[in-house]
Image: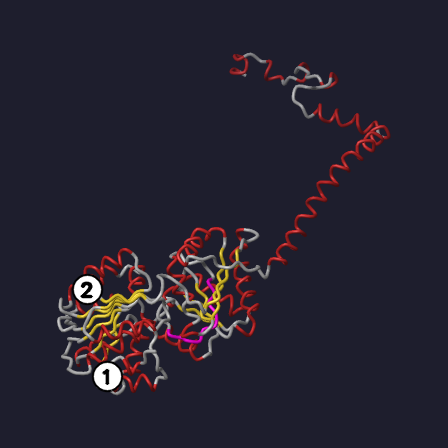
Amino acid sequence: MTKFADLNLNPKVLKAVAEAGYETPTPIQAGAIPPALEGRDVLGIAQTGTGKTASFTLPMITLLARGRARARMPRSLVLCPTRELAAQVAENFDTYSKYLKLTKALLIGGVSFKEQDALIDKGVDVLIATPGRLLDHFERGKLILSDVKVMVVDEADRMLDMGFIPDIERIFGLTPFTRQTLFFSATMAPEIERITNTFLSNPERIEVARQATASETIEQAVVMFKGSRRDRADSEKRKLLRALIDAEGEKCTNAIIFCNRKTDVDIVAKSLKKYGYNAAPIHGDLDQSQRTKTLDGFRSGEIRLLVASDVAARGLDIPAVSHVFNFDVPSHAEDYIHRIGRTGRAGREGKAIMICNPRDEKNFDAVEALIQKEIPRIENPLKSDAVAEDDTQEKPKRERRTRTRKEADQDKPKAAEKAEAQPETSEEKPQKQRRGRRGDRQDDNKVVGMGDHMPGFIALSFDERRTG
């Protein structure tokens, strides 16, 4: 079995790795580190949670151990799709380079430009950035990329989903043609393959698992859900989520709950807190300080349930997440792999439960097609209650219909007896109806002419009235 000591890493890097508690590299690390140290381009394809970050951080630190950075000219560049993933890479860099005098800068949104400019001006060996913020600094004239020797693109498929591919292509054009490129992705969409063919030179391809496969240590399940009424469906779905959490009991030490929309993240988190659950939201609209505080609280155990959008589906290095709940079926099937990859990490067991309603069935079919297996269906814990409620609503309706028909037959002889006993009443009603109709009057109500009742002035002729 390969050990880190066999990979020709810098001795100071090996010392830091040993202190971090690692002895044996993961398959992606064992496959990617040797060609990276030789200066070759690397194309790594592996599911999330397999140690991809260390597979490029360790050789990069070893390659940069000699040399010195110049002002505004970073020696290496790591591109990440989200702030959280960029922050995780920065933490890995700090962990593994602590015995080497290397500098870094983290360029992400939500942080002052002035602070970031000050770091760049001093010169950095490693620049870790999201594409948008990197280009902001470049366009302001604060950054020169002509000295980049190693360029890393992490979670390339997520870059594609977030619309960063044009930015990535532009950044490739700003770096030297002679750079070394390390390119990592969990899946290989056609657009990703086009970029690798364009910008990578004869890369060493390392594929440690079938594309888009979930870890075998993750138990998967789905609940097929249909609301009783459209206006109640959302609240019933949140009630189902609480029931699923309760059903896991003490096994659910902590969990990430994924929603497709940011608004739903806030609503679900607020609902959970209302019912006494220790929950907090995280999504792209929160400022960076709030997101960092929430993640730190989740890592430390202060927060049990993290309700997240897909911004948190990648790059969260939280090894001991026991459960993942997909409140919504993801719109992109690949996101399912990344979501559930937050649990069952580093060989641990995990559980992923998804709620699927009728309008999500098309997306659900795409998920099963991608992972090439059927996700086990589990019983809705609220189903028995819902059926009982439906029965109590339907029974009165059936009884009412049956009783109405019987009563109609029974009322006929009673109505006839009542008519015989009260003949006067039956004769009065038609008279009232006849009076109510225009032109149907009795003889004693004939219209009388004016006759003696005519006023005198009407009988006068016109001349008499004028002269009178």
Of mark 1 and mark 2, the one earlier in the sequence is 1
Q: Position of residue 264 (x, y in %)?
A: 44, 61
Q: Position of residue 442 (x, y in %)?
A: 73, 18
Label 2 near label 1: C-beta < 8 Å?
no
Q: Give the residue at x 70% y 17%.
A: 446
Is residue 259 located in the magenta-colored stretch of the structure? no
> Which labelled disc corresponds to residue 407?
none
The foreground one among 253 and 71 is 253
The foreground one among 313 and 449 is 313
Could you say which quadrant of the image residue 364 lies in?
Answer: bottom left
Is residue 321 located in the magenta-colored stretch of the structure? yes
Q: Give the residue at x 64% y 17%.
A: 454
Q: Position of residue 447 (x, y in %)?
A: 68, 17
Q: Is residue 84 left or right of residue 233?
A: left
Would you name the residue on which mark 2 appears? Answer: 202
Q: Amino acid at mark 1?
A: Asn
Protein image colouring? secondary structure
Q: Give the residue at x 47% y 51%.
A: 359
Could you say which quadrant of the image residue 465 lies in?
Answer: top right
Residue 358 in view of the camera: yes
Q: Label 1: how many residues lie within 10 Å, few (<14), some (14-19) or many (20+)?
A: some
Q: Give the residue at x 21% y 66%.
A: 203
Q: Position of residue 47 (x, y in %)?
A: 36, 66
- Callout 1: helix, strand or loop? loop
Task: Report how far apart the C-alphas of labels 1 and 2 lie in the structure.
Answer: 26 Å
Question: What span is colored magenta in the figure?
Answer: 317-326
Q: Amino acid at mark 2?
A: Asn
- Callout 2: helix, strand or loop? loop
In the rendered image, the vertical position of residue 76 relative to residue 161, given as above or below: below
> Which labelled disc corresponds to residue 10?
1
The foreground one among 241 and 263 is 241
In the rendered image, the vertical position of residue 165 relative to residue 97, given as above or below: above
